[in-house]
Amino acid sequence: MGSKNKLKRFNQNSTFTNVVQPSREEITETEYVFKGKWRKDFFKNDKPIVLELGCGKGEYSVYLAQNYPDKNFLGIDIKGARFWFGAKEALELGLDNVGFLRTQIELIDRVFGENEIDEIWITFPDPQIKFKRTKHRLTNPAFLDRYQRVLKPNGKVHLKTDSEFLHGYTLGLLEGKGWEVDYAHHDVYGNAYSPKHVTAIQTHYERLFMSKDKLITYLSFRFPNVKKG
């Protein structure tokens, strides 16, 4: 994508009513305006909130919003030119239960209040296989602590990835901590009992991975009913 197209989409995002693009300073130097108030001030309803971290083009968020109108969905990515596609489609479809937030995922607990989120989806993140990149791995202990702070007790996390390494790494962490794993499978399309919401849609990157005969893995888990400080 050319730089002119990126800039055009970034500017268009600022006109979309379903997109929020705060500066890092707005989040880190003050109490963020939507923190603890996403239902009331952004979605303007009392429905549960589901996040998609690293939402890319936003296909998953839009699909989930279409099929689960009783929930709110918020796609998060630092690359606004990507989720422009999902934001535009959601507006064209008249969906009022899906939005997009441009920010770093590491700031999640500065953006959302304690117990504010009901579920989290992590879809095809970079597995960050090299050891020196571990701190950027979206299921490392530091990120899991952030998720636990914003999730309601017993809130669920979903991980869908083409990386057997990330799937196994995350599963090992969870089992080591004794946390409850609801579902885990290394080939969701090869399993007739996979949850429908996992196989009914494929993201842009997922289709690319599958065209190279990569298996798609999925696991979901819950944190214990003990909040992190």
Image: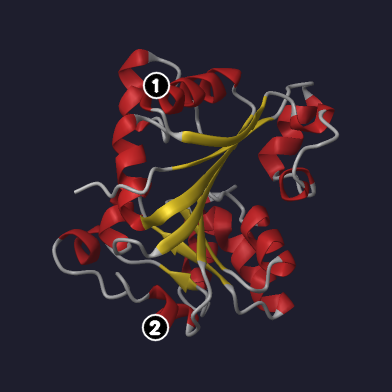
In percent of the image, x 56 and y 53: which residue is there?
A: 82
Residue 66, image x, y percentages: 72, 68
Element at label 2: helix
Q: Secondary structure at mark 1?
A: helix
Work out whether mark 2 precedes mark 1 in sequence or the reverse, and give the earlier one: 2
Q: Amino acid at mark 2?
A: Asp
Amino acid type for the residue under numbered disc 1: Gly
Residue 118 pos. (x, y %) = 47, 60
Dot label at residue 87: none
Indicate which label's residue lies in the foreground, 2 or 1: 1
Residue position marked by numbered label 2 in the rendering:
41
Question: 96 and 39: which one is in front?
Answer: 39
Give the residue at the far left of this rendering.
Answer: 29
Which residue corresponds to the image point at 31% horizontal and 71% vertical from the top-left? Answer: 36
Task: Say which residue appears at 19% left-offset and 49% top-offset.
Answer: 229
Tell me the distance, in whole angstroms, between the alpha carbons under discs 2 and 1: 39 Å
